[in-house]
Image (cartoon, grey):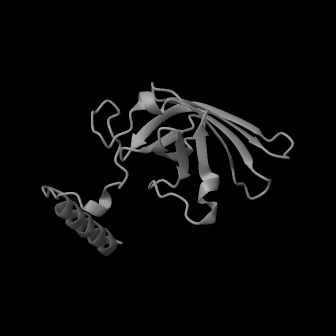
């Protein structure tokens, strides 16, 4: 029993000694690659929230129904309202509102307050946005156009 305690004490001291007093620079791999951009910054590569603000509509693809009729309202105060109707689904209506952040200058990250779920849209131009993954990567191929929402 004493041997186990001594081994445990020495191990603890070795761990403590290795962790104290050292300052390391963060590894680039440790940083999240999607940087949050200050939406008040005046950088030509960042979205202008007043020009992006508006209502966007489209029908997104779905695995278990013909599609999801989507209406997304983006406000210049960094809030959003998302309404989705799952076509041919009983009780297939969903609404969410919350805040969004601008990532990497052009990707809007919508955060659902009740669950923390995040949805990403990239600003394509003044009249359209496209659903992307968390890195802002757009869908490719024939189906890419199905993920675009057009401004009303």
Q: Nearer the viewer, residue 62 or 98?
A: 62
Q: Which residue is at 85% across, 47% downward?
A: 88
In-front residue for pair 16/152: 152
Q: Nearer the viewer, residue 82 or 149?
A: 149
**Is the residue 72 above or below the residue 129 in the image?**
above
- Quarter of the rendering occupied by the N terminus: bottom left
Q: Residue at x 79, y 53 (%)?
A: 66
Which quadrant would residue 29 be assigned to in this image? bottom left
Q: Position of residue 141 (x, y in %)?
A: 58, 66
Instruction: Say which quarter of the image contains residue 23.
Output: bottom left
Task: Tell me which residue sits at (26%, 65%) in the image.
Answer: 9
Residue 119, visible in the rendered structure: no
Outermost residue to the top: 77
- Count of picture labels: 0
Q: Position of residue 31 (x, y in %)?
A: 31, 55
Residue found at the very far bottom of the displayed protein: 3
User: In the rendering, at what x and y percent does residue 17 appear?
Assistant: 17, 62
Residue 107 percent across, percent down from the top left: 44, 46
* Res. 55 image quadrant: top right
- Report the front residue among 31 and 51: 51
Q: Quadrant of the C terminus?
A: top right
Say if residue 22 shows up in the picture. Answer: yes
Tell whether 29 sits left or right of 92.
left
Is 87 situated above or below 52? below
Residue 4, compared with residue 142, is above or below; it is below
Q: Viewed as shown, does residue 47 lie left or right of 82? A: left
Q: Is residue 81 left or right of residue 136?
A: right
Q: Residue at x 41, y 44 (%)?
A: 106
């Amino acid at each position: 029993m004493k041997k186990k305690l001594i081994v445990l004490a020495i191990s603890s001291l070795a761990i403590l000694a290795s962790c104290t007093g050292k300052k390391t620079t963060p590894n680039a791999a440790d940083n999240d690659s999607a940087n949050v951009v200050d939406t008040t910054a005046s950088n030509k590569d960042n979205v202008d929230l007043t020009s992006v603000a508006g209502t966007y509509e489209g029908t997104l693809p779905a695995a278990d129904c013909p599609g999801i009729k989507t209406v997304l309202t983006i406000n210049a105060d960094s809030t959003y309202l998302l309404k989705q109707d799952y076509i041919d689904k009983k009780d297939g209506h969903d609404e969410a509102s919350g805040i969004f952040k601008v990532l990497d200058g052009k990707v809007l990250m919508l955060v659902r307050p009740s669950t923390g779920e995040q949805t990403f849209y990239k600003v394509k131009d003044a009249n359209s946005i496209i659903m992307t993954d968390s890195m802002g990567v757009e869908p490719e191929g024939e189906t890419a156009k199905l993920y675009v929402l057009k401004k009303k």
